[in-house]
Image (tube, helix red, strand yellow):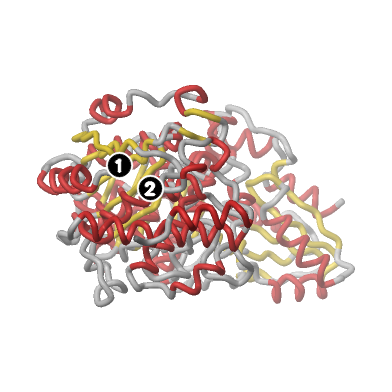
Amino acid sequence: MAKVATRVAYGDALKELMVENKNVVVLDADLAGSTKSGEAKKVDPSRHFDMGIAEGNMMSVAAGLAASGKIAYASTFAMFATGRGFEQIRNSIGYPQLNVKICASHAGISVGEDGASHQCIEDVSLMRGIPGMKVIVPCDYNEAKQACKAVAEIDGPCYVRLGRSGVESVNGDDYKFELGKGVVLQKGEKVALVATGLMVQEALEAAKRIETAPTVVNIHTIKPIDKELIIELAKTHDTIVTCEEHSIIGGLGSAVAEVLAEAGTACKLVRVGVQDVFGESGKPAELFAKYKIDADAIVEAATK
Amino acid sequence: MENKELALHAKNIRRNIVKEVYSAQSGHPGGSLGATDILTELYFEEMDINEENLNTLDRDRFVLSKGHASPALYAVLAEKGFLPEEELTTFRAINSRLQGHPNMNYVEGVDMSTGSLGQGISCAVGMALANKLDKNDHRIYTVLGDGECQEGQVWEATMSAAHYKLDNLCIIVDNNNLQIDGHVDEVMSVYPLDKKFEAFNCHVINVDGHDYDQLRAALKEARETKGMPTVIVAKTIKGKGVSFMEDQQGWHGVAPNEEQYHAAMKELEAE
């Protein structure tokens, strides 16, 4: 099956949401073609607002729309949504717990050629720190589409992290997305690969090359994190390897570390992710190799 | 409403502002007292808001973009009977609904949580967009500080309000020319405010922010202006009503001591 980017799923979810729910409105900051929020415009242009290259304003405007009973989807690249717009998200959306769904695309170093200025590796960390904010990192088209639709049913602010590059289909057609519930993709022993977003496909690829047949888990919801599952994994495995296309500081690796530390388990933790450095221009696969977040890097982390 | 009656409401509101800040020994008296006449004109004449429609979207709404003037907003809500007057003395205290900067989830009649400057006007733009979408004819009002206009977001918001032709949005700038570090034109000049907003495709009216006739006429003109938002630049005196606080940089975020409190209350005694 051809690889499809999770942002494409967002566009397809919006097409349905715009028809199903008249309260849905969509905002973008001059990137409607790239984030795929422009798909909403095709259904009803009166409910799609291009706010121009002014992300901070867009976030607060989304808050105002939500305060008027709308379900406001706000989109731009993850860098500008959560970086430029952080304080607006925190104060206009987070503090009053308004019904805004920040669906940000082009997250992580898989942005590729645009380079470090556009490769957001801090967004999960930033969003996770806002009280009440739910953080979802879908791994494939099917999961992304369901997640983007599911957040419409959740009252309050949500962050959905979407990617630029195509990803393989990980979940089957009968897959049902459930907020906060990790998905065990394959059961193994000794090592558990706990991955999120497009790193799930890398983890599955890595698992094929690890002799001991590790467990592979998809953690699509970083907040609230599936504590129960992580503690269970820690009790039944020697090592947990977290896999994320994000800084190892503040993202999935940190969230899992918090759970493990508080639970007091003896399980070892290895964090595969961007090691507190900025990315650079290059093809996504080249960057994954150089920054050691590809399947090879996961195999190495799992077997050392 | 007679100007005399408005002035009486304003006096009560000013007394309560002083009481709030004195009780808390914390808060922003200067900007609250200065904006009082604008808020009085809005809530007692201009806006469609009452006990019955308070809990609905079927009314005019107000965003205090300069959220630090919360004592004025709470005092106005109390004067309208939406908030028990005795609660005002809990301002800024632990477990109080009356947060230092307004929280929309705690107090009915607070239409947006504000406090971080520049954001409230954008929220008001979102509310005005929603009303247009819903064919809701009610209007959205927001009050900004002049120092607040140094925030780039104010101009992003204004650009978007004009772009979407939000003639249901009325932006009022409380122009007292003072901010924490000094006079606005000395700290970081925002002037000319009227020409800037005009250049952003808004209808602009300059008024004396303590003159009810001028405020009333400007708000009517704003209502009748179609195809663009209206900005009312209201010249005000920070600390208005308490002589020793008037036009003083030092009364931005300072509470009166006991002696100053009694002196202020004496000045604000009802006739």
Mark 2 lies on residue: B35
| x and y percentages locating residue B224 in the rendered image | 10, 46
Name the one closer to the observer, B35 or B166. Answer: B35
Of label 2 and label 1, which has the lower sequence position? 2
Give the secondary structure at mark 1. loop
Mark 1 lies on residue: B209
Within-10-Å neighbours for mark 2: few <14, some 14–19, many 20+? many
Q: In which quadrant of the rendered view does residue A10 lie? A: bottom left
Residue shown at the point (87%, 71%) measured from the top left: A264
Task: Please tell me if label 2 and label 1 are on a single chain.
Answer: yes
Q: Quadrant of the N terminus of chain B?
A: bottom left
Name the amino acid, label 1: Gly
Tell whether B249 sits left or right of B154. Answer: right
Q: Are marks 2 and 1 in contact (CB under 8 Å)?
A: yes
Note whether B213 is above or below B187 in the view shown: below
Within-10-Å neighbours for mark 1: few <14, some 14–19, many 20+? many
Tell whether B19 sits left or right of B172. Answer: right
Q: Quadrant of the C terminus of chain B?
A: bottom left
Residue shown at the point (29%, 55%) measured from the top left: B7
